[in-house]
Amino acid sequence: MDMRGMEPIFKGSYDVIVIGGGIAGVAASVSAARAGASSLLIEKSCNLGGLATGGLISWYEPLCDGEGTQMIYGIAEELIRLSVKYGFENLPKCWDGDGKNAPRNQRYSTFYSPGVFSAALDGYVLENGVDLRFDTLTTYPVMEGTLCKGVVCESINGREYFQAKVVIDATGDASLMHRAGVPTVSGKNFMTYIAHYCDMELAEQLCKDSDFSAFRKWMNTGSDMFGKGHPEGMDLLTGITAEEITAYMTEGKKSLIQRISQKDKHSFDIMTIPTMPQLRTIRRIVGACDFNAIDGETYPDAIGDCGDFRPDGTGKHYQIPFGALYNENFPNLLAAGRIISSPQGDGWEVARVIPTCALTGEAAGKAAAVCIQKNCRITDLTEQDIKKIRIPNKM
């Protein structure tokens, strides 16, 4: 058997390599670079943003608690501003200042154009000194015991190897961590398929009010986040196999066609369909400790605070422990985004949304840079180090 091309080509060495160019990966790579670490961001598609862009979940969830208090600052706030810098928005004007006494229905959140936001993210990453690789699938970590020495990737160039001192998994499915041997847990998901559409009624309304934030509508042909609309007889989905993802995407498009076949084909258009499965909780790590989203609970190793995007979450305040970003047996692997150690339920629901992904990504990037500066393991970081990593409540 001819096995030419099987040996990877060495492509370079970095302080920090981030796998996955969603919001968490963008935040992780930028924060590591800002802290002085050479940083490479590897994305398997050709666009940044993940579920927030290619997944069409284009609502930037609140940075506040719903009672006038901003919970998340840092890169999460930079990104909400970037999401609407070049495109439409419905960001409440009360948040142009400090948001004090903002009405309950005026949360620090906005709808945005996923295409515009994705295009803007390239410049944001590159301008912050991050090296970027598109159309490159990271297949395996290169392990020396429980130490990750780098990653093997596949691209149009063939098989390649990148060396790293610290690797951050921001894949959304913990595939790198899982292949490295980190204990992981699979989630359970309802079948959701959201496309964006417009029709004549929306076009007429746009001509009246010029509000593009209301022109692009979501068409969900599957379940809502509570399971209403999940196909009868269909098992809940994990999304951890190619076969299941293929079935998910084909079933989603089938349900979309069934929905629009009932319409006058000259009366509407599907503006775009998702380029990735819109699964909420695929797989997460088992960390040194869990983020459970318990209102008012504090941690000595807290990396930041967040609120709750859900209607019944108004006024809730959560802290995220640094221990949720790593497993103590793997000295240079960090998790960011919806794969942090957060059991199914409130923790995983809060961890998976844009602001929290940005927060955990920023903290992971900072932590990686500190480990490199001190030449130490993740578990060797001190209380003072964690204070440097923490995303402040107030800028």
Image: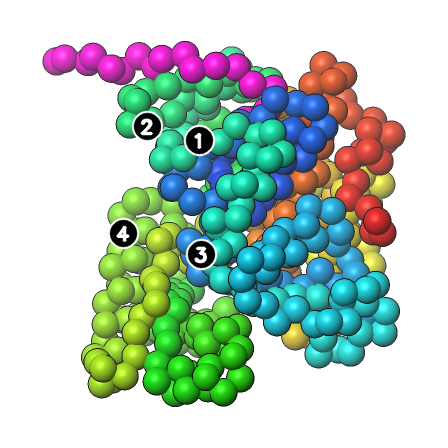
Kind of residue indicated by mark 3: Gly
> Any mark on residue 151, and which?
none
Asked if residue 7 is among those painted magenta in the image, a careful observer would answer yes
Kind of residue indicated by mark 1: Arg
Measured Cα–Cα span from mark 4 to mark 3: 24 Å
Q: Are marks 4 and 3 in contact (CB under 8 Å)?
A: no
The residue lying at 65 percent from left, 75 percent from top is 311
Q: Is residue 19 left or right of residue 240?
A: right
Question: In this rendering, does residue 187 appear at all?
Answer: no
Q: Which residue is mark 3?
A: 115
Measured Cα–Cα span from mark 3 to mark 2: 24 Å
Earlier sequence position, callout 1 versus callout 4: 1
> How far across and down, in percent of the image, does residue 364 sit?
66, 35
Q: Residues within 10 Å of mark 3 (few under 14, many from 20)?
A: some
Q: Which residue is mark 4?
A: 246
Q: Is residue 270 left or right of residue 1?
A: right
Earlier sequence position, callout 2 versus callout 1: 1
> How far across and down, in percent of the image, does residue 145 sit?
53, 15
Q: Is residue 104 left or right of residue 27?
A: right
On screen, residue 181 above or below 102: above
Say which element carries label 1. Answer: strand
Q: Nearer the viewer, mark 1 or mark 4?
A: 1
